[in-house]
Amino acid sequence: MKEKELLREIGSLVRESDGLNSALSRVQTLIASECGGALLILRPEASATTAISAAPAVCEFLESRVFPFRGLYVAPVSAGNRAKGTLVACIGTWGVPGELLHRITTFAGQQLTELARRLALPSLEYAEAA
């Protein structure tokens, strides 16, 4: 799938989702099918004191030898004027360019922000795609 098609599909999946958990799971599945492997986590700003890479699922993904390239990408997500968080995307691949993975993560963060605002969420909670 080309970049524009992938971004369009991410936007469509998020728009069709009824919540952040559902959107995360659907986008994670799409990225994994196109790139090789993915782990998406939504971290609220309140959890910013602990390192992203210290999360057990992130450590396990990054230490895995399944993919020759494993990257960690982040993008801001917010639900309103105060509720902020970070989309953490661990992506494993056999050769997808890193700049594409960064653009995918940034776009997914933007789409999740729009979903959170549309749902009028008062705050963001920790979420990990299933």
Image (spheres, rainbow, N blue to C red):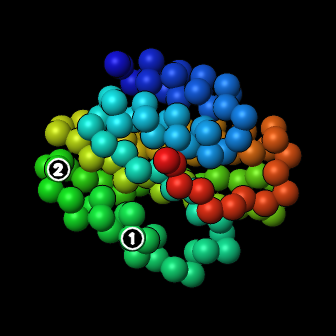
Q: As drawn, is 62 to the left or to the right of 3?
A: left
Residue designated by label 2: 66
* Mark 1 neighbour density, 10 Å: few (under 14) some (14–19) many (20 or more): few
Residue designated by label 1: 56
Q: Amino acid at mark 1?
A: Pro
Of labels 1 and 2, earlier in sequence is 1
* Mark 2 neighbour density, 10 Å: few (under 14) some (14–19) many (20 or more): some
Mark 1 vs mark 2, CA separation in Å: 17 Å
Q: Quadrant of residue 126?
A: bottom right
Q: Quadrant of residue 87?
A: bottom right
Residue 106 drawn at (x, y percent):
51, 44
Q: Is residue 100 above or below residue 55?
A: above
Q: Residue at x 53, y 55 (%)?
A: 128
Q: Residue at x 67, y 32 (%)?
A: 17
Task: Give yes or no for contact between labels 1 and 2 (Cβ–Cβ under 8 Å).
Answer: no
Q: Residue at x 30, y 64 (%)?
A: 60
Between 54 and 117, the residue placed more toward the observer is: 54
